[in-house]
Amino acid sequence: MRILVTGGAGFIGSHLLDRLMKEQHEVICLDNFYTGTKNNLQKWAGHPNFESIRHDIIEPISLEVDQIYHLACPASPVHYQYDPIKTMKVSYLGTSHMLGLAKRTKARFLLASTSEVYGDPDVHPQTEEYHGNVNTIGIRSCYDEGKRIAETLSFDYHRQHQVEIRVARIFNTYGPRMLENDGRVVSNFIAQSLQGKPLTVYGEGTQTRSFCYVTDLVDGLMKLMNGDHIGPINLGNPEEYTILQLAEKIRDRLNPGQEISFKPLPQDDPRKRKPDITKAKTLLNWQPQISLDTGLTETIAEFKQRLAI
Ligand code: NAD
Ligand code: UDP
């Protein structure tokens, strides 16, 4: 198959791309390199099945493909809040261009949506039926509402034009190739511990998240794409930790005795998050295999190599 991966130079996209290349598909990566890097694509440069196109998806593009994994969108709060209007344009215009492409080519289209569509949830753990608690005017709204409209658009293309869609609601994912300065919690804590800096915990660290290792996530995305269920389907690891627990876990492994520095909690930071993955288990026969300890070991090893520590 010829498979388009938007955002293929990014963290999750590049791991997905590696899997698709290993399965001997023809793969096109579409990326404007905002948060993605050419390093992530280096090993495929010159491979006859691989093509990389520098393109901003807020502009249309014409390609011939069989499947589209649509991941292009900055995912870290630091990056999506840097230019929130652009984030909204990527979510709406970018997604509508990719759905238009899917409609014309009859390609199957998978949207990388997010647990952020649940906002600061008052249902716990979050099931796909929960409609969410999202602030429409806060600093996270460009991303949260952007993904919500991307879901709406996907379902309307499905109902109105019979586009074959798949919608994944991805929960916090971590692993090798996260940018060390992208501001997300796992990369921050690892980089800070390795560099001998205090670990920055926002608020009191009582908020919770559930962390999925990237190869598990990629496996879930591919099962969803190639299965019969359109979703939305939660993909994430239901093991839940407070942020303080995560800080202590990483600190104690890398730099015991390092100070934890408490910083103000950002506006609208969700207080808790944990996926209900019953649907993924029963409909996709998927559940995460990699524990946080094992995943951290892999991630830390790659960070050490990259940061030359
Ligand atoms: P990332 O920032 O590493 O990757 C995003 C990629 O999209 C980058 O390569 C970036 O350059 C590219 N991109 C951004 N704007 C673009 C544009 N206008 N045109 C073309 N390319 C553009 O983030 P990630 O963690 O790999 O996330 C990938 C997708 O998964 C995103 O859609 C994100 O919303 C979703 N997601 C990720 C997580 C997570 O925990 N990592 C959780 C939920 C959802
Ligand atoms: N966080 C933190 N210190 C950091 C970075 C993040 O305490 O250096 C917190 C953040 O406030 C949030 C959680 O960790 O409660 C996860 O943040 P991240 O940006 O990784 O993902 P998201 O908030 O989008 O789930």
Image (cartoon, helix red, strand yellow):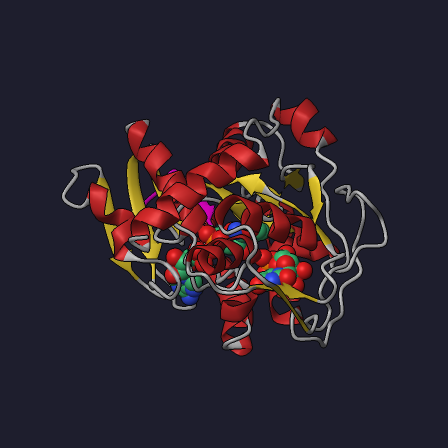
Viewer-nearest residue: 2 or 272: 272
Q: Is residue 285 above or below residue 77?
A: above
Q: Residue at x 57, y 55 (%)?
A: 257
Residue drawn where x is 53% and y is 56% of the image: 189
Picture quadrant where residue 176 is located:
top left
Q: Nearer the viewer, residue 58 or 274?
A: 274
x, y percentage for residue 89? 51, 71
- Which residue is rendered at x = 55% and y = 50% of the image? 256
Asked if residue 80 lies left or right of residue 309, the reply is right
Front residue of 46/272: it is: 272
Q: Residue shown at 71%/59% (left/top)?
A: 205
In the visual, does 152 lie left or right of 128?
left
Magenta stretch containing residue 245, yes or no? no
Task: Please tell me whether residue 67 is drawn above or below residue 92 in the rendered image.
Answer: above
Q: Is residue 66 magenta?
A: yes
147 with respect to 124 (left or right): left
For the question of whether residue 275 can be seen, the reply is: yes
Of residue 200 and residue 66, the one placed in the foreground of this image is 200
Q: Quadrant of the N terminus?
A: top left
In the image, is 265 to the left or to the right of 31? right
Q: Residue furthest front?
A: 257
Give the number of callouts. Answer: 0
Quadrant of the image occupied by residue 17: top left
Percent of width and height locating residue 160: 62, 50
Percent coordinates x, y for residue 293 in the rendering: 55, 35
Can you tell me which quadrant of the image ligand 2 is in? Answer: bottom right
In which image quadrant can residue 279 be found?
top right
Q: How far across and how far down the image is residue 265, in percent? A: 70, 70
Q: Confirm whether residue 214 shows in the render.
A: no
The magenta region covers 64-70
Q: Residue furthest left?
A: 46
